[in-house]
Amino acid sequence: MPGTSAINTPASAPARRRGLAPLEPVSLRARWMLGFSFFVVFVAVWSFFTLGGFVSPTFLASPVTMVQEGWLLFAKYDFHYDIGMTVWRVVGGFVLAAIVAVPLGIAMGAHKGIEAFLEPFVSFCRYLPASAFIPLLILWAGLGELQKLLVIFIGSVFQVTLMVAVIVGGARRDLVEAAYTLGANNSGIVKRVLIPGAAPEIAETLRLVLGWAWTYVIVAELIGSSSGIGHMITDSQALLNTGQIIFGIIVIGLIGLVSDFAFKALNRRLFVWSAL
């Protein structure tokens, strides 16, 4: 019929380009290629300005110089030891924070009385920068490892607590009522309904906060430290060695990226049912 095509495809409807459509998913291969392409473009622009002489090496080392300085750090200055110390501090402080924050957040989310008692204090502390505690922590714990672990602990524990409480508190009421109907008691509701239902999101929260922990460890290592990536960056800044500074920053990013992928893989393995 003459009017059929006009009805099915209105002339006013814009043509939809699949690759540019909002919320249109891309294939895994395309995602990897696009992500890799950004780094290629970034390094190309960086090389153009540094190797072309547009930027002084004093202010920004070239990619070639950065790689040379990185090799020197491993070959001459035992940079692998600094990396190990930084990773140990991040993992130690983050695990301590998770041990305290996850049970506390579950208690706050499950029991509104506990939430009313603790939530104002936790919310207040969440806005306090961890770096502001460094002078006090040095006074209380000295310049050893405990001080650095506490910086990461303080920077992570309140964030995790509040986020876990929100996740647990947002549980589906119909599941809770169904469990009561089947004879579950209060502790059974927490153990068999709230915690299993919130576990995948709690794991995802821990993955996100682990990324924040990396920012806290560098702050802790910038002051009163004799080892670690942050300590190396401070020493390199005093020598105006931007190649080593950039290499240290890139190493932090790579370690964080690897830990993020590992956390994602572990979450998918532990909570396969959450993706169904």
Image (cartoon, rainbow, N blue to C red):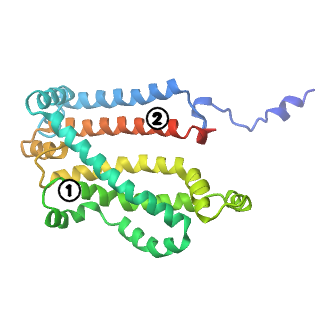
Say which residue appears at 48% left-offset and 58% top-offset. 164
In the displayed structure image, the side of residue 225 where residue 151 appears, left or right? right
Mark 1: amino acid: Leu
Q: Tell me, for residue 146, which label it has, or none.
A: 1
In the displayed structure image, the side of residue 97 where residue 14 appears, left or right? right
Looking at the rendered structure, the secondary structure element under dot 2 is: helix
- Point out residue 132 in the picture as x, y percentages from the top left corner: 24, 65
The answer, for residue 163, to whether it is visible in the render is yes
Q: CA distance from mark 1 to mark 2?
A: 30 Å
Foreground residue, 140 or 178?
178
Image quarter of residue 189: bottom right
Looking at the rendered structure, the secondary structure element under dot 1 is: helix
Mark 2: amino acid: Ala
Please give the count of numbered marks on the rendered protein. 2
N-terminal of the pair, mark 1 or mark 2, is 1
Say which residue appears at 20% left-offset and 62% top-offset. 134
228 is higher (above) or lower (below) than 20: below
65 is higher (above) or lower (below) than 103: above
Foreground residue, 203 or 48?
203
- Point out residue 253 in the picture as x, y percentages from the top left corner: 30, 38
The residue labelled by disc 2 is: 265
Q: Nearer the viewer, mark 1 or mark 2?
A: 1
183 is higher (above) or lower (below) than 227: below
In the displayed structure image, the side of residue 90 where residue 38 appears, left or right? right
Q: Tell me, for residue 39, which label it has, or none.
A: none
- Point out residue 63 in the picture as x, y percentages from the top left corner: 21, 28
Foreground residue, 275 or 187?
187
Foreground residue, 194 or 122?
194
